[in-house]
Image (cartoon, coloured by chain):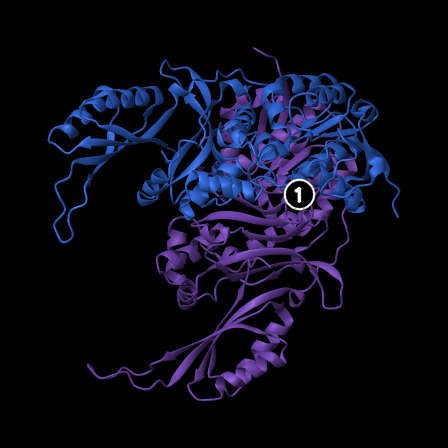
Chain colours: A purple, B blue
């Protein structure tokens, strides 16, 4: 029996992830000790209510409400409370005292990342956050280390399991948004108030973290453009399927050159069409996947469970082992990149493609008029398809009546978002158009 | 302008990967320096013939034939020569002198890994090898670090691009093995002598590396069971497609319990059927993917370019940046796991499923006889499908003649490989059977 030294691990929070982390630390102590070269001693779990009923049964003597005393003297602090305060203060306290911190707190990182990294750098402590994006999927370490010698050009991420589940249900089972969301709530994928997921806030936090890491610069949450999935209709999902697309909520991070030539980056979240044969189209249910395009490596994809207590606990424990190995060998940890100061460009500068569906009267000259508006806006048309709508039901046996209106589906070539948006506004105002049925961006083209 | 210290980088080998590594080091010096906090100075490139014509134009003054002098005084040595000697001696020289080594040499790692890791540990140097498996795909670091707190149960890897290209051609384009291989050679995916790829040697080396890493134990190449794809026929590929499968050459690493209860691991390479809806089935062309099942994380997949000069150079440079960051911050590097001493079990102990196709005379009692042989071998049948073969062409207009023979396709439940193999041998010897048409294993079941 090898005698290992002890490393003191403090856990803040015992929710679905925290509970599993505690259980695995207690149950797999020997195996982890042999991998680390030290014993990971869980010295306590700080929670608001030690008496609360929890999914995982843990020794009651570990619980405390006094997080600050627990952090004192810990070698590694695991923060899984979520939210900004008091999580931020505790993480700063831990880093300042020289402890390594492992967190899965995406909100905290997306809003206070630079402050925390600075505090860590001051004392040579480490801040690990693999669990903050993509649940169990290793994506932080590959971006920070494996691709550090490459140049990441673009990330397309399905990083929110709830919305992917909802959109997948709508696509595969023909649910409406409301039906799919109700089912997600039933299964525990969506919270009672699903705003954070459905409106894209969660994905935007992850986009800020991924973009900062991938481009070695600081991308604040406030600079991430965000649209959620509330506007996605069953009709859009069905039309997408017919046209060989699927709608996914994407976190998009890319290098970009602005109209004035400025080199910058873009981080944005919105539902978009991607082709059925794109690897991301095959990501079903609540799974996550991050598709990375790098200058030398080409296309890479990282796929797995994006949430779940035990799955996310895997990512947390990977970070705990890394922190522990650092303690065992001594010396400072891995340095973060010196951050480049790359401007984050507004969404109007992004280049994308639109799929625009409009309802028009079925009379001559309408197509020409719409084509003219697009050309004036500098938007060139890649495809245009007209579908005749038979508005009134003909009597049984009688032939269909002449259509009262038509639907026009227009696919554009790539253009700047600002030009596309302005052009859609001009189309909407035209007398040639009865109404705008749908506007969706198309992403994932290999250009 | 920040003044950075210099780190001396020596490159051994200037083939397709080495040439790209040199080019990227020279062209992206500033960007890399800002990420590392030090300048990566390529001090020389050791090659056999400095005058040889190369794909990438590099400054002639960098070339030398004197690898040993080049290694002296280098902070980081990149070994991309391939082969065992002199690569092994140079890597040992570099590690012993305290330099960190980055290598993509799978043959060397699979045969001399323990010796090299031991040499590195002696002086606190680091040995990085992300490029040895999966080309550009980050898989070594996720296994070593991200999943270090989890328990990897199984890896199914498509880790050889050439054979995946060949099998994919056979499936998608209906090529024979010979046609597909000729096409692979034409495109440069296969070498003039494709033995290393086609017979599974390359995949077996990678399996040894992955298994050692995933199970924190030592799995020597000699313990890896290996079958190549030479026996895979167009008829098998077509039958697989009809049955909802695809044939892939898989590197399989898994935890296993032997018949006598011994806990061990298995590493093996063979062509196997996997279901069309398995994520690995969608890996086309020369791409690679590694599917990992871990106890807590669940199913993960890592996908990307498995070969190619510039793609693999991305993985090499990621390792170079890691090594360089370590030099900048000082102190020893990341510790490898203390290796568990888990026995590597022979392939006979593996549990798998068989799909067995036999040709039988079309007479009563044949099915019963075969079912009896399988039952005696302890193999239970999951599916059995009989196809009648009309051996002789009937005259035009006439009804088909009674069949002379039938083909029987038997899918077994999971059983131990030794039992399955013995049972197939017994079936082959039975008078109820005319010939064995095909024997393939089925992998990737979610059990």
Give the camera-side residue of B184 and B4. Answer: B184
User: Can see residue A81?
Assistant: no
The residue under label 1 is B310
- Relative placement, left or right, of A293 versus B159 is right
- The location of residue B426, given as percent across then percent down, is 25, 20
- The location of residue B174, given as percent across then percent down, is 40, 46
- Relative placement, left or right, of A313 versus B393 is right
Give the camera-side residue of A138 and A219. Answer: A138
Q: Is residue A156 above or below residue B393?
A: below
Q: Which quarter of the rendered picture does the C terminus of chain B lie within?
A: top left
Residue found 12% across the figure and 32% down from its top: B363
Residue found 54% across the figure and 66% down from its top: A441
- The location of residue A375, given as percent across then percent down, is 60, 79
Q: SS for tag 1? A: helix
- Relative placement, left or right, of A149 versus A300 is right
- The location of residue B411, given as percent across then percent down, is 28, 33
Q: Quadrant of residue B189?
A: top right
Give the camera-side residue of B420 and A398. Answer: B420
Q: Quadrant of residue A64?
A: top right
User: Can see residue B364?
Assistant: yes
Residue found 59% across the figure and 74% down from its top: A380
Give the camera-side residue of B390 and A162. Answer: B390
- Relative placement, left or right, of A112 versus A123 is left
- Determine crowd level at label 1: few under 14, some 14-19, many 20+ residues with C-alpha closer than 10 A: many
The numbered mark 1 sits on a residue in which chain?
A: B
């Amino acid at each position: 029996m090898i005698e290992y030294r002890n490393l003191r691990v403090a856990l803040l929070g015992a929710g679905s992830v925290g509970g599993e982390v505690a259980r695995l630390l207690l149950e797999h102590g020997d195996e982890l000790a042999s991998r680390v070269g030290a014993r990971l001693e869980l010295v306590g779990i700080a929670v608001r209510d030690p008496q609360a009923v929890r999914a995982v049964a843990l020794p009651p003597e570990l619980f405390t409400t006094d997080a600050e005393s627990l952090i004192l003297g810990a070698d590694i602090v695991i923060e899984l409370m979520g939210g900004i305060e008091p999580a931020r203060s505790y993480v700063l306290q831990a880093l300042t005292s020289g402890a390594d911190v492992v967190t899965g707190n995406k909100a905290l990182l997306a809003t206070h990342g630079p402050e925390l990294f600075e505090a860590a750098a001051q004392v040579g402590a480490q801040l690990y956050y693999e669990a903050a994006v993509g649940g169990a999927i290793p994506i932080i370490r590959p971006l920070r280390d494996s691709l550090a010698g490459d140049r990441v050009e673009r990330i397309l991420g399905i990083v929110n399991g709830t919305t992917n589940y909802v959109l997948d249900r709508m696509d595969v089972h023909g649910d409406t948004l409301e039906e799919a969301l109700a089912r997600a709530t039933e299964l525990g994928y969506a919270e009672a108030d699903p705003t954070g997921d459905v409106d894209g806030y969660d994905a935007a936090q992850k986009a800020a973290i991924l973009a900062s890491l991938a481009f070695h610069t600081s991308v604040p949450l406030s600079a991430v453009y965000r649209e959620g999935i509330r506007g996605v209709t069953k009709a859009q999902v069905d039309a997408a399927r017919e046209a060989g697309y699927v709608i996914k909520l994407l976190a998009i991070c890319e290098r970009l050159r602005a109209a004035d030539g400025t080199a910058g980056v873009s981080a944005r979240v919105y539902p978009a069409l991607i082709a059925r044969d794109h690897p991301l189209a095959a990501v079903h249910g609540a799974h996550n996947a991050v598709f990375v395009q790098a200058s030398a490596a080409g296309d890479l994809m990282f796929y797995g469970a994006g949430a779940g207590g035990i799955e996310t606990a895997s990512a947390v424990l990977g970070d705990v082992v890394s922190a522990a190995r650092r303690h065992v060998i001594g010396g400072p940890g891995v340095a973060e990149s010196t951050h480049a100061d790359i401007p984050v460009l507004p969404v109007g500068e992004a280049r994308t493609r639109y799929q625009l569906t409009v309802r028009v009267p079925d009379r001559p000259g309408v197509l020409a008029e719409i084509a003219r508006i697009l050309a004036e806006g500098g938007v060139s048309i890649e495809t245009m398809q007209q579908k005749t709508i038979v508005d009134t039901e003909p009597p049984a046996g009688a032939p269909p009546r002449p259509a009262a209106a038509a639907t026009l589906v227009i696919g554009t070539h790539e253009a700047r978002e600002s030009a596309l948006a302005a052009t859609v506004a001009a189309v909407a105002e035209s007398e040639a158009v009865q109404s705008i049925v749908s506007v969706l961006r198309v992403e994932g083209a290999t250009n």
